[in-house]
């Protein structure tokens, strides 16, 4: 049991080590765009710099709806923060290729 807890803890630390983030930013004046196409749909949040991102485009994080159980909830948080003028910290994962350009996929949204 102790080994399982250590393994899970190590996995969580390693996931955090590879994530990049925006830091808390106000997105009330930022443009957002939602697209529904063959990829299952996605939301772009423009002009948000993702710190330490290795993706080609590190200023437009993208929320992928396909295969993401919490995408609707994260989308709701982005809209709520935008409407209320609250700051968010967007955490992203490994780059995703969209039309030959890689973007930072949103894996977590913190609202302040």
Image (spheres, rainbow, N blue to C red):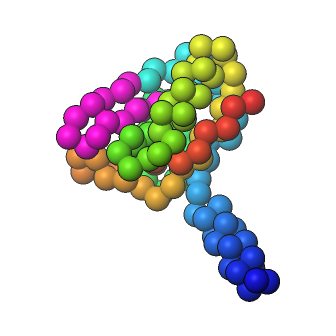
Which percent across, then down, holds residue 16?
65, 61
Q: Nearer the viewer, residue 108 or 58?
A: 108
Q: Residue at x 27, y 31 (%)?
A: 36
Q: Nearer the viewer, residue 91 or 77?
A: 77
Q: Is residue 106 visible?
A: no
Left or right, 16 with reference to 71: right
The residue furthest left is 38
Above or below, comparing residue 69 to residue 1 in the picture: above
Left or right, 38 with reference to 14: left
**Residue 35 magenta-drawn?**
yes
Q: Residue at x 44, y 47 (%)?
A: 68
Which percent across, then down, holds residue 11?
64, 72
Left or right, 106 with reference to 38: right
| Residue segment shown in magenta | 33-45
Q: Nearer the viewer, residue 74 or 51?
A: 74
Q: Is residue 72 visible?
A: yes
Which percent across, then down, holds residue 59?
48, 38
Above or below, comparing residue 3 to residue 95 in the picture: below
Quadrant in the picture for the C terminus: top right
Q: Residue at x 28, y 47 (%)?
A: 98
Q: Residue at x 67, y 38 (%)?
A: 110
Above or below, comparing residue 18 to residue 40 in the picture: below
**Residue 100 magenta-drawn?**
no
Which percent across, then down, holds residue 2?
79, 83
């Amino acid at each position: 049991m102790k080994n399982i807890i250590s393994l899970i803890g190590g996995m969580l630390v390693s996931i955090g080590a590879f994530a990049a983030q925006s830091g808390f930013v106000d997105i009330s004046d930022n443009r957002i765009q939602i697209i529904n196409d063959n990829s299952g749909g996605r939301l772009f949040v423009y002009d948000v710099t993702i710190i330490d991102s290795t993706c080609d485009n590190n200023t437009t994080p993208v929320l992928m709806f396909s295969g993401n159980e919490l995408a609707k909830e994260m989308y709701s948080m982005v809209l709520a923060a935008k409407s209320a003028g609250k700051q968010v910290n967007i955490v992203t994962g490994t780059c995703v290729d969209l039309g030959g350009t890689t973007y930072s996929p949103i894996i977590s949204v913190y609202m302040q």
